[in-house]
Every structure is written in structure tokens, then in C-alpha cells.
Image: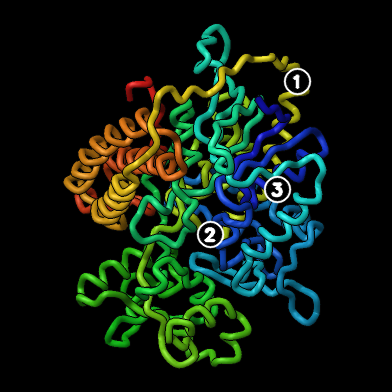
Amino acid sequence: MREYDFIVVGTGISGLSFALKAAASGKVAILTKRRPEISNTAWAQGGISCVADPQDSFEAHIADTIGAGAGLCEKNVVDTIIRSAPAAIEEMITQGVNFDREENGSFSLGREGGHTQRRILHARDTTGREISEKLLAAASREKNIDILENHFAIDLVTTAKLGLTGEENRIVGLYALDEACGKIITFRSEKIILCTGGSGRVYLYTTNPEVATGDGVAMAYRAGATVANMEFIQFPPTCLYHHELQNFLISEAVRGEGGVLIGKDGREFMSEYDSRGSLAPRDIVAQAIDHEIKRTGGPCVYVDISHRGKSYIKERFPNIYETCLSVGIDAAHKPIPVVPAAHYQCGGIQTSIDGATSINGLYAVGEVACTGLHGANRLASNSLLEGAVVAARCFEHAINYQASGHQSKNYNIPDWISGDAEDVDELVVIYHNWDEIRRLMWDYVSIVRTDKRLKRAATRLQNLRREVQEFYWNFKICPELLELRNLVETASLIVKCAQRRQESRGLHYTLDFPKSNDVKPPQNTLLKRESDRE
């Protein structure tokens, strides 16, 4: 049994930001299933949105966010997070984060799809890496923070799970696999913060790192937390199309700096779909590219920024330029082949603007959570902002909750029992199921959906869940099995939410209901586990 005042799961901007604040108030454990530098944050290229130009305004940023969200944004959440951006940026700078600046010292601001103004702070085209490295370095210096790498959180422990039905359900701890020794460790804490990122790896083609397997959403759902709007999966339009690099994102900022989308015939096509052309919001651009690929029979489309010249491209997008060059694509002389790929989960564990979930003491911050900021479609570069702002508010909520008179109890959490489970001797079966989930999700539940495709996906996923459960109870725990378990759970939640939304809205587009249902105010799609048999 290991006990902490705060347990954070995940080492992206949300988890590190929370931990740095909480370290002054107690002992903090940060659990990460791989190395701490591997996170969705570290892979973020474009930047972080913040009103920082006299020509811009909070009102304009709020309007752009709500416009992209297709009617499902929580307006008070949008207002609060966007107005909190300057303070969040200043906090990051005090931790050593360096954003690009102009010669006069002002921020160098980029523009991305859906934004009416330049308001994207960046560090060349590796903004996430800069933030991740500086926050991780700051956390490593804190004596009150233990960073536990290769610790895979398995399941949450709640009072309901312990059979204590006479009180409100609250979090009391979690079980985690220490991969170094192969043992299951029991952690006790009454404040657990899930910052596990998204679930891009549920799809065959994704821009996400290998760790994005929906772990936080799956754990919270199994524990009884409410999950919202999982049907809204963002497919950024421009993932590099190349057999050697299948998950490299060509940042939205490339189009923000003048990149134009063209078809295989060299013709610009986005103006036929939206008056904003290549700078339309991501859902519109991704659907347009999907339509263009199917119309022409080509395997991809292209983004052309060659007219900006080699020196500018190498200076503004050094990582993108060198990565493309490594596979024989010189962006200064020819267009970059691109296709949509799964990138960002706009739904997640339903939370307040302070990260509080429906289970007392359990919080969720960042991509794993659904605060209402993104609605049915995330505005570019609002994700890092949400992680930083909500992490700060989450810490204040957790401290105030403790100070309000909540009495901690010394809950007795039983040790993990593995029983007579055998070692996993047929990993090939796990890999086969993993591959099948990702392929069926790509074929049936990606950019364009139908009731028939969703029904097929739901039927097969139901069978796969049974197979995975059998593996889970009959074999010893290993990371591959845990990820498969979470992957099939998250995929099932996406399909269930998609089946319930009988309209097209934002990132959810279905041929059976091609229009939005605007007769009544749009509703969130909410799911909650009702029994252990589900």
C-alpha cells in the first residue's frame, strides 16, 4: 500500500500543471505507463491559443470557439477558459517555457483554421515538446513529487466498489501495474486526477502516440463516472500520407501561414465547400477531403506551401520540413501528400469547469475530460489552453473541498488478487484483436457514418469485449492486455454515443441524418455504467 495526498495519472500539460501546484500542499505521485516524456502534449505541433494582439479580443476568440463547436459549447465554460488564457501563459513562462517572439519582444502569433485572428503562441512547430520538457523538468525538481514511470493504472477503487453503500460514492485509490517488477501496487488517495489524454489509437490511422488508448475514459466508466459526447472524434485533415510515416501530423499552422489544399489535379478545391477555403474549421475540411478522395479516386490530397519559399518554411516549420525531407518530400518545391487521421477526442469523462467528475474526489483534466469547451468540434489550439487553465482550477477545487469539512477516512483497500491466472502465452491473439478493433473503427466509425455501419461495429465490438474479458480474467496482467481492454471499452463508448445522436453535428456526420436537428436545443450524449455485467 502506497499513500499520497494527490495521485495524478498522466504526464501531459494537465497532469504536470496540476502536480506543480499541488506539490506545495502535499505529497504527489504522477503515474505514467511509459516514460514521462511520452504524451499527447509532447506531440502537439501548432501551439496554444491566447488573445495577445491589440487587434484581437476575448469576445472574438469566444465567438470563434462557439462557432466551431456547432451549438454544443457551454458558453460560461468557454468564456472562463478563454479569459484565463493570459494568466495560464504567464504561469508557463515562469516555469521556463519559451514561446517565439518578434524582434520587438511581442509574441509571434500564428493563425489556424476557424480563427478569425492571429492568436496562436508557438515554439516553432514543436510547441508541445517545449511545454512538456520545461514542465517535466520543473516537476522533477520538486521534492514533493514522485514521478513513477512504467506504472500502468489498471482500475479505480471507490467506496461503491468496496461495498460501502451508506455514503456518497467517492474515490479512495487505484491499482497499478509496476512493469519493472510485474507486481500490482495498491495506491491510496482520496484525490485522484486523470490526465491520460485521448484515444486516437482506437483508429487504424492516427496522429497520436502509442500511449493514447483511452485508458482514463475506460477506467472512469468502469468505476461509474458519467461519460459524455464520445461520438465527436476529431480527424485533422492533414496527416502525412506516406508508407514510412503513418502518424505524422502536418500542423494546422501550415494552412494558417498560407498553405493551400489541392487535389491530385493540382486544383484548389476547398473554396467549393466553404467560403473560408483552406482555413475552414477542421470538421468541414476533413469531410471535404474525404469527399474529394472518394470523388477523384486518389489516395490523398495535398497541402502546398511551396510559394512561401525554402528559407521561411525551414525557419517556421523546421520539424515538419526535415521530417518530410527524410522521406523524399521537399515542401519548398512540391506539395505535401495528406489524408485525415484520428487526432482528438472532444468528448470524455463529464466534468465541471474545475475538472470534478460525478464521483467525489475523482477529477479529470485535458483531453480525457469533457468540460463543454469544445462542443461538437474543437477549435484549433484550444486543447493545451484547456489543460493548463482547468488544471489550476482543479487544484483550487480539490483544496477547497478538503477545507470545507470533508473528513478523510482510513479506507481498507484489499490487495489485488491474481488468483491462478496463467501467463499470457499467446500475445498474437491480443495483437489480432487490437488490429481488428482499429480497422473496424476506421471502416465503420470514422469521418462518414451510417446506421448500418454503426450497427456492424457495435455487434463485433460486443463479441470482442467478451473475448477480451475472458483473456483478462484467465491470464496474468500485462500492458498489452490492459491497453486492449481499455481500447475495446473506449471504442464501444464511441459507437454507443454515435448511435444515439440521430443527426449530423460537428464531427459526427451520418448519411442517414445529414442535417442537424435544430428544432430543439442540442443535447449532450451521456453514458453511465449501470452494472458490472454491462
The image quarter in which residue 420 lies: top left
SS of the residue at dot 2? helix
Q: Earlier in the sequence, mark 2 or mark 3?
A: 3
Q: Residues within 10 Å of mark 2 (few under 14, many from 20)?
A: some
What residue do we see at 61% from left, 65% from top? Answer: 47
Q: Are marks 1 and 2 in contact (CB under 8 Å)?
A: no
Question: Residue 532: x, y in percent?
Answer: 37, 21
According to the picture, the residue beneath numbered tag 3 turns out to be 17
| Residue shown at the point (57%, 10%) measured from the top left | 167
N-term mark: 1 or 2: 2
Residue 274 placement (x, y as % from top left)? 37, 70
- Determine contact: label 2, label 3, CB under 8 Å: no
- Which residue occupies the foreground of this view, 258 or 186? 186
Q: Looking at this rendering, what residue extends furthest in the top direction? A: 166
Residue named by callout 2: 64
Q: CA distance from mark 1 to mark 2?
A: 38 Å
Q: Which mark is residue 404?
A: 1
What's the image's color scheme?
Answer: rainbow
Please provide percent x and percent y for residue 3.
Answer: 70, 27
Whole-percent x and y of residue 346?
46, 49
Real-space CA distance between mark 3 and mark 1, rounded to the nearest whole angstrom: 24 Å
Identify residue type, mark 3: Ser
Query: Label 2 amino acid?
Result: Asp
Query: What residue is rendered at 71% in x and 25% in y?
Result: 401
Q: Quadrant of the N terminus?
A: top right
The answer to whether 472 is drawn above or below residue 38 in the figure is above
